[in-house]
Amino acid sequence: MINIALLEKKFNSLNKFNLVLASFFFSLMTLCVKNVDKRIPIYELVFFRSLLSLMITLFIINLKNINPWGNNRPLLILRGVLGTLALVCIFFAIRNMPLSISTVIQYTYPIFISIFAGIFIKEKLTLNKIFALIIGWIGIFVILNPSQLSNISVEIERISISIAFLGAIFTALAYVTVKKLSFTEDVYVIIEYFPLVSFITLLPIVLINWVTPNWSELVWIIGIGLFTQLGQTFLTIGLKNLTASEASIINYLQVIFGSIWGIVFFREIININFLLGASLVLLGTIISATKIRKRI
């Protein structure tokens, strides 16, 4: 019999390493998405991911013998909707952009968290956060300017860039809801609502436009579900034990992992402009998560 309580205790003791593992598993998820043939629609990939994650999560919830519906159902449903929208946008960006660039854009979400925290949980938009926003967007411009992209022989449609940023925005909003829910809900109930909402909303679309995956594609699809589930689990546990700001900095490791996979598996070119731009985005993330202490 699996002792879930003991496993949770061990995971909680890992502290920040939970988020390192989350970044690693999410990066493997992006690798799987990139390898699935484009004939399989994005919404079908998200659906399969949700189905696998839902099965695993419900199994764990049953072992723990807890209420699967949670306490704050409206916010749980909202978390599921935001997560679904984010995942669709992220999968689209991964499929239609170099893995390294799509990952950097996705990881502008900590900067958006600073904005949404001020709007929804009344955190002040301090000078260091405004400075962080400026630095982060300069970094994005350095990466996405036409001269930089032509140097690495990459053409990216504006719609792909826009959708990638939408993915970052929805991710930031989902982060805010997860952090708030972590005070009142069990980790696995929070995780459950994400695939549950995705499964329910995407089922009719998938049935109407069904495309049967072959065995090779099925292996990558299973990988998407498995690695996303692992990433979500370690992310949610990490958010429960750390502030969202601390978590956002550690999660930037996925940019490093994503860039490595892009170079190794897809022969993507990483030049000095990309490194400079990514460094500026990371600097903006660190500054946005840093509190300025007044000297007395």
Image (cartoon, rainbow, N blue to C red):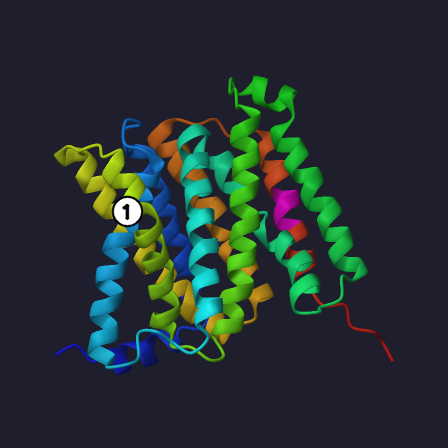
Whether residue 61 is visible to the viewer of this picture, yes or no, is yes
Q: Is residue 184 left or right of residue 54?
A: right
Could you tell me residue 290's position as x and y percent? Answer: 69, 64
Circle 1 residue: 203
Q: Quadrant of the N terminus?
A: bottom left
In this view, the residue farthest toward the right is 296
Q: Is residue 48 magenta?
A: no
The residue shown at (77%, 68%) is: 292
Could you tell me residue 219's position as x and y percent? Answer: 18, 41
* Main secondary-structure element of the magenta-colored stretch: helix
Q: Is residue 32 left or right of residue 76?
A: left
- Label 1's element? helix
Q: Is residue 233 left or right of residue 174?
A: left
Amino acid at dot 1: Leu
Q: Which stretch did the figure color magenta?
A: 279-283
Whether residue 224 is visible to the viewer of this picture, yes or no, is no
Out of 36 and 213, give the one closest to the viewer.
213
Q: Is residue 114 left or right of residue 106?
A: right
Could you tell me residue 235's position as x and y percent? Answer: 42, 63
